[in-house]
Image (cartoon, rainbow, N blue to C red):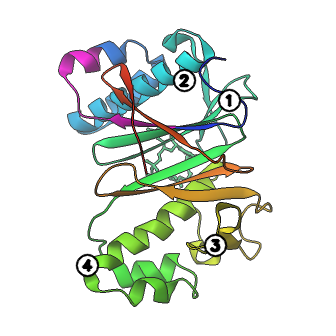
Protein backbone atom coordinates (compact mmCIF):
# COMPACT_ATOMS: atom_id res chain seq x y z
CA UNK A 1 0.00 0.00 0.00
CA UNK A 2 1.32 3.45 -0.79
CA UNK A 3 0.72 6.98 0.51
CA UNK A 4 -0.96 5.97 3.76
CA UNK A 5 0.39 4.87 7.14
CA UNK A 6 -1.20 2.57 9.70
CA UNK A 7 -3.94 4.27 11.76
CA UNK A 8 -4.57 6.98 9.17
CA UNK A 9 -7.71 8.62 7.91
CA UNK A 10 -7.78 10.54 4.64
CA UNK A 11 -10.62 12.61 3.21
CA UNK A 12 -10.87 13.31 -0.51
CA UNK A 13 -13.27 15.86 -1.88
CA UNK A 14 -14.51 15.19 -5.41
CA UNK A 15 -16.28 17.91 -7.41
CA UNK A 16 -18.89 16.06 -9.47
CA UNK A 17 -19.33 18.64 -12.20
CA UNK A 18 -16.76 18.09 -14.92
CA UNK A 19 -16.31 18.09 -18.69
CA UNK A 20 -18.00 15.58 -21.03
CA UNK A 21 -14.61 14.21 -22.13
CA UNK A 22 -13.61 13.62 -18.50
CA UNK A 23 -16.89 11.79 -17.90
CA UNK A 24 -16.21 9.59 -20.93
CA UNK A 25 -12.70 8.75 -19.65
CA UNK A 26 -13.96 7.91 -16.17
CA UNK A 27 -16.71 5.70 -17.58
CA UNK A 28 -13.95 3.49 -18.99
CA UNK A 29 -12.70 2.51 -15.52
CA UNK A 30 -16.12 1.40 -14.22
CA UNK A 31 -17.19 -2.23 -13.95
CA UNK A 32 -20.06 -3.57 -16.07
CA UNK A 33 -22.48 -3.39 -13.13
CA UNK A 34 -21.46 0.19 -12.33
CA UNK A 35 -22.07 1.19 -15.95
CA UNK A 36 -25.44 -0.50 -15.80
CA UNK A 37 -26.30 1.42 -12.62
CA UNK A 38 -25.09 4.67 -14.23
CA UNK A 39 -27.42 4.13 -17.19
CA UNK A 40 -30.38 3.37 -14.90
CA UNK A 41 -30.71 6.96 -13.64
CA UNK A 42 -33.54 9.02 -15.07
CA UNK A 43 -31.58 12.22 -15.58
CA UNK A 44 -28.33 12.65 -17.51
CA UNK A 45 -26.96 14.81 -14.72
CA UNK A 46 -27.45 11.93 -12.23
CA UNK A 47 -25.72 9.51 -14.61
CA UNK A 48 -22.77 11.86 -14.99
CA UNK A 49 -22.46 12.48 -11.26
CA UNK A 50 -22.46 8.74 -10.56
CA UNK A 51 -19.80 8.10 -13.23
CA UNK A 52 -17.54 10.89 -11.96
CA UNK A 53 -17.92 9.78 -8.34
CA UNK A 54 -17.28 6.07 -8.96
CA UNK A 55 -14.52 6.78 -11.48
CA UNK A 56 -12.73 9.12 -9.07
CA UNK A 57 -13.17 6.68 -6.18
CA UNK A 58 -11.65 3.92 -8.30
CA UNK A 59 -8.71 6.15 -9.29
CA UNK A 60 -7.99 7.23 -5.73
CA UNK A 61 -8.42 3.83 -4.03
CA UNK A 62 -6.42 2.09 -6.76
CA UNK A 63 -3.63 4.63 -6.18
CA UNK A 64 -3.29 3.48 -2.57
CA UNK A 65 -3.29 -0.17 -3.59
CA UNK A 66 -0.97 0.38 -6.58
CA UNK A 67 -3.47 -1.23 -8.94
CA UNK A 68 -5.20 -0.20 -12.14
CA UNK A 69 -8.56 1.48 -11.28
CA UNK A 70 -10.47 -1.03 -13.38
CA UNK A 71 -8.91 -3.99 -11.56
CA UNK A 72 -10.39 -3.01 -8.18
CA UNK A 73 -12.92 -5.54 -7.02
CA UNK A 74 -15.76 -3.79 -5.20
CA UNK A 75 -18.59 -5.73 -3.61
CA UNK A 76 -21.70 -4.58 -1.75
CA UNK A 77 -22.38 -5.50 1.87
CA UNK A 78 -25.77 -6.78 3.06
CA UNK A 79 -27.33 -3.28 3.03
CA UNK A 80 -25.42 -1.98 0.03
CA UNK A 81 -22.18 -0.61 1.52
CA UNK A 82 -19.49 -0.83 -1.18
CA UNK A 83 -16.37 -2.59 0.09
CA UNK A 84 -13.06 -3.84 -1.25
CA UNK A 85 -13.10 -7.57 -1.81
CA UNK A 86 -10.29 -9.54 -0.11
CA UNK A 87 -8.98 -6.50 1.77
CA UNK A 88 -8.78 -6.26 5.52
CA UNK A 89 -6.43 -3.32 5.93
CA UNK A 90 -8.03 -0.54 3.86
CA UNK A 91 -11.60 0.67 4.27
CA UNK A 92 -13.52 3.39 2.47
CA UNK A 93 -16.89 5.09 2.35
CA UNK A 94 -18.51 7.57 -0.02
CA UNK A 95 -21.03 10.36 0.40
CA UNK A 96 -22.44 12.96 -1.97
CA UNK A 97 -24.65 16.02 -1.77
CA UNK A 98 -25.30 18.48 -4.58
CA UNK A 99 -22.26 18.66 -6.83
CA UNK A 100 -19.78 17.42 -4.24
CA UNK A 101 -18.72 13.95 -3.10
CA UNK A 102 -16.35 12.99 -0.31
CA UNK A 103 -14.43 9.74 -0.11
CA UNK A 104 -13.05 8.65 3.27
CA UNK A 105 -10.15 6.21 3.34
CA UNK A 106 -9.10 4.49 6.57
CA UNK A 107 -6.42 2.09 7.74
CA UNK A 108 -7.91 2.16 11.26
CA UNK A 109 -11.05 0.14 10.65
CA UNK A 110 -14.49 0.48 9.09
CA UNK A 111 -15.34 4.07 8.23
CA UNK A 112 -18.54 6.02 7.55
CA UNK A 113 -18.87 9.52 6.15
CA UNK A 114 -21.76 11.86 5.41
CA UNK A 115 -22.00 15.36 3.99
CA UNK A 116 -25.04 17.55 3.45
CA UNK A 117 -25.40 20.82 1.62
CA UNK A 118 -27.00 23.29 4.03
CA UNK A 119 -30.52 23.99 2.75
CA UNK A 120 -33.99 24.65 4.10
CA UNK A 121 -35.33 21.37 5.50
CA UNK A 122 -38.93 20.77 4.51
CA UNK A 123 -41.10 19.99 7.56
CA UNK A 124 -38.22 20.72 9.91
CA UNK A 125 -40.18 20.38 13.17
CA UNK A 126 -41.55 16.97 12.08
CA UNK A 127 -38.04 15.88 11.09
CA UNK A 128 -36.73 17.02 14.47
CA UNK A 129 -39.36 14.85 16.22
CA UNK A 130 -38.73 11.84 13.99
CA UNK A 131 -34.95 11.92 13.88
CA UNK A 132 -33.64 13.58 17.03
CA UNK A 133 -33.59 12.24 20.59
CA UNK A 134 -35.65 14.23 23.12
CA UNK A 135 -32.42 15.60 24.62
CA UNK A 136 -31.20 16.81 21.22
CA UNK A 137 -34.36 18.61 20.08
CA UNK A 138 -34.04 21.84 22.13
CA UNK A 139 -30.56 22.30 20.71
CA UNK A 140 -32.16 22.85 17.28
CA UNK A 141 -35.49 24.39 18.26
CA UNK A 142 -33.99 27.10 20.50
CA UNK A 143 -32.03 28.59 17.58
CA UNK A 144 -33.16 31.46 15.34
CA UNK A 145 -34.83 30.24 12.14
CA UNK A 146 -31.75 30.91 10.00
CA UNK A 147 -29.58 28.54 12.06
CA UNK A 148 -32.00 25.66 12.64
CA UNK A 149 -31.39 23.83 9.34
CA UNK A 150 -27.62 23.77 9.78
CA UNK A 151 -27.86 22.51 13.36
CA UNK A 152 -30.32 19.78 12.36
CA UNK A 153 -27.97 18.70 9.55
CA UNK A 154 -25.04 18.52 12.00
CA UNK A 155 -26.95 15.92 14.03
CA UNK A 156 -28.12 14.18 10.87
CA UNK A 157 -24.59 13.81 9.41
CA UNK A 158 -23.27 12.46 12.74
CA UNK A 159 -26.03 9.83 12.86
CA UNK A 160 -25.67 8.86 9.22
CA UNK A 161 -21.85 8.67 9.34
CA UNK A 162 -22.07 6.47 12.45
CA UNK A 163 -24.63 4.09 10.90
CA UNK A 164 -22.73 3.97 7.59
CA UNK A 165 -19.65 2.83 9.52
CA UNK A 166 -21.43 -0.40 10.35
CA UNK A 167 -22.89 -0.67 6.86
CA UNK A 168 -26.49 -0.53 8.01
CA UNK A 169 -27.38 2.81 6.43
CA UNK A 170 -30.11 5.07 7.79
CA UNK A 171 -32.33 3.05 10.06
CA UNK A 172 -35.26 4.07 12.20
CA UNK A 173 -35.67 4.83 15.04
CA UNK A 174 -33.06 7.56 14.59
CA UNK A 175 -34.46 9.33 17.66
CA UNK A 176 -32.94 6.50 19.71
CA UNK A 177 -29.44 7.49 18.68
CA UNK A 178 -28.27 10.29 20.93
CA UNK A 179 -25.36 12.52 19.98
CA UNK A 180 -23.45 15.04 22.09
CA UNK A 181 -22.03 17.53 19.60
CA UNK A 182 -19.79 19.05 22.25
CA UNK A 183 -18.15 15.82 23.44
CA UNK A 184 -14.75 14.52 22.28
CA UNK A 185 -15.02 12.21 19.22
CA UNK A 186 -14.83 8.96 21.23
CA UNK A 187 -17.85 10.01 23.34
CA UNK A 188 -20.08 11.81 20.83
CA UNK A 189 -22.36 8.77 20.47
CA UNK A 190 -23.90 9.03 23.94
CA UNK A 191 -26.53 6.36 23.74
CA UNK A 192 -28.42 4.16 21.31
CA UNK A 193 -30.73 2.46 23.79
CA UNK A 194 -29.92 -0.95 22.30
CA UNK A 195 -31.47 -0.06 18.91
CA UNK A 196 -28.29 0.22 16.88
CA UNK A 197 -25.02 -1.75 16.64
CA UNK A 198 -23.98 -3.15 20.03
CA UNK A 199 -20.68 -1.38 19.97
CA UNK A 200 -20.33 2.29 20.80
CA UNK A 201 -16.73 1.89 19.70
CA UNK A 202 -16.93 4.34 16.81
CA UNK A 203 -15.41 7.80 17.16
CA UNK A 204 -17.26 10.55 15.33
CA UNK A 205 -16.22 14.07 14.51
CA UNK A 206 -17.23 16.77 12.08
CA UNK A 207 -15.47 18.55 9.27
CA UNK A 208 -16.32 21.26 6.77
CA UNK A 209 -16.23 19.71 3.28
CA UNK A 210 -16.75 23.08 1.56
CA UNK A 211 -18.48 26.37 2.22
CA UNK A 212 -22.20 25.78 2.65
CA UNK A 213 -21.82 22.11 3.66
CA UNK A 214 -21.59 20.18 6.91
CA UNK A 215 -19.91 16.81 7.25
CA UNK A 216 -19.20 14.08 9.79
CA UNK A 217 -16.82 11.15 9.79
CA UNK A 218 -16.89 8.06 11.96
CA UNK A 219 -14.38 5.28 12.37
CA UNK A 220 -14.31 2.02 14.34
CA UNK A 221 -11.55 2.90 16.77
CA UNK A 222 -9.82 6.16 17.64
CA UNK A 223 -9.58 9.11 15.32
CA UNK A 224 -6.03 10.18 14.49
CA UNK A 225 -4.91 13.63 15.69
CA UNK A 226 -4.65 14.80 12.10
CA UNK A 227 -7.14 13.92 9.34
CA UNK A 228 -5.46 14.53 6.00
CA UNK A 229 -7.68 16.24 3.46
CA UNK A 230 -7.08 16.41 -0.26
CA UNK A 231 -9.03 17.25 -3.38
CA UNK A 232 -9.42 15.23 -6.56
CA UNK A 233 -9.75 17.57 -9.49
CA UNK A 234 -10.31 15.99 -12.88
CA UNK A 235 -7.84 13.18 -12.29
CA UNK A 236 -5.21 15.42 -10.69
CA UNK A 237 -4.69 15.64 -6.97
CA UNK A 238 -3.94 18.61 -4.79
CA UNK A 239 -3.61 18.97 -1.04
CA UNK A 240 -6.09 21.21 0.72
CA UNK A 241 -7.45 21.84 4.15
CA UNK A 242 -10.90 20.47 4.85
CA UNK A 243 -12.34 21.63 8.15
C1 LIG B 1 -26.94 4.19 2.23
C2 LIG B 1 -27.69 5.39 2.64
C3 LIG B 1 -27.28 5.71 4.07
C4 LIG B 1 -27.33 6.55 1.69
O1 LIG B 1 -27.85 7.74 2.11
P1 LIG B 1 -27.76 9.11 1.25
O2 LIG B 1 -27.86 10.26 2.20
O3 LIG B 1 -28.69 9.03 0.13
O4 LIG B 1 -26.40 9.11 0.57
P2 LIG B 1 -24.86 9.42 0.82
O5 LIG B 1 -24.50 10.25 -0.32
O6 LIG B 1 -24.48 9.89 2.17
O7 LIG B 1 -24.22 7.96 0.68
C5 LIG B 1 -24.40 7.22 -0.47
C6 LIG B 1 -23.24 6.26 -0.61
O8 LIG B 1 -23.12 5.47 0.55
C7 LIG B 1 -22.63 4.18 0.18
N1 LIG B 1 -23.54 3.21 0.77
C8 LIG B 1 -24.61 2.59 0.19
N2 LIG B 1 -25.19 1.77 1.10
C9 LIG B 1 -24.50 1.89 2.25
C10 LIG B 1 -24.63 1.29 3.55
N3 LIG B 1 -25.58 0.41 3.84
N4 LIG B 1 -23.74 1.64 4.51
C11 LIG B 1 -22.76 2.52 4.24
N5 LIG B 1 -22.58 3.12 3.03
C12 LIG B 1 -23.46 2.81 2.05
C13 LIG B 1 -22.59 4.15 -1.34
O9 LIG B 1 -21.25 4.34 -1.74
C14 LIG B 1 -23.45 5.31 -1.75
O10 LIG B 1 -23.05 5.98 -2.91
P3 LIG B 1 -23.04 5.30 -4.37
O11 LIG B 1 -24.33 4.55 -4.47
O12 LIG B 1 -22.94 6.45 -5.30
O13 LIG B 1 -21.83 4.43 -4.36
C15 LIG B 1 -29.22 5.15 2.57
O14 LIG B 1 -29.58 4.95 1.25
C16 LIG B 1 -29.67 3.96 3.41
O15 LIG B 1 -29.80 4.01 4.61
N6 LIG B 1 -29.91 2.86 2.86
C17 LIG B 1 -30.32 1.74 3.70
C18 LIG B 1 -29.75 0.53 3.22
C19 LIG B 1 -30.80 -0.15 2.43
O16 LIG B 1 -31.88 -0.40 2.87
N7 LIG B 1 -30.44 -0.42 1.18
C20 LIG B 1 -31.35 -1.04 0.29
C21 LIG B 1 -30.60 -1.95 -0.63
S1 LIG B 1 -30.16 -3.46 0.23
- Distance (Cα) linking label 2 and label 1: 9 Å
> Answer yes or no: do the residues labelled 1 and 4 have beta carbons within 8 Å?
no
The answer to whether the beta carbon of the residue marked 1 is less than 8 Å from any atom of ligand 1 is no
Q: Mark 4 = which residue?
A: 146
- Residue 169 in the image: above or below residue 150: above
Which quarter of the picture shows residue 148? bottom left
Decide: few, some or many residues near mark 4? Use Cα within 10 Å; few <14, some 14-19, many ≥20.
few
Q: Mark 3 = which residue?
A: 177
Q: Mark 1 = which residue?
A: 90
Residue range of the region highlighted in magenta in the rendering: 11-24
Whether residue 83 is visible to the viewer of this picture, yes or no, is yes
Which residue is at 39% across, 90% downward? Answer: 142
Q: Mark 2 = which residue?
A: 61
Q: Which comes sooner in the sequence, label 1 or label 4? A: 1
Q: Position of residue 127 (x, y in %)?
A: 42, 77
Nearer to us: label 3 or label 4 = 4
- Residue 82 in the image: above or below residue 116: above
Nearer to us: label 3 or label 1 = 1
The outermost residue toward the right is 198
> Answer yes or no: do the residues labelled 3 and 2 have beta carbons within 8 Å?
no
Amino acid sequence: MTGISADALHLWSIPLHTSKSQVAQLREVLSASEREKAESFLLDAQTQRYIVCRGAVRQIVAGYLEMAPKQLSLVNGKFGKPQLEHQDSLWFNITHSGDLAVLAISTIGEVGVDIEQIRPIRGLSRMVDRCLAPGERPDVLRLPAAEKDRQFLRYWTHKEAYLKTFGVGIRRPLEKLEIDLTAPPSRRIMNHFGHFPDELAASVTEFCPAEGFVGAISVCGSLPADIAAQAWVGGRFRAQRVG
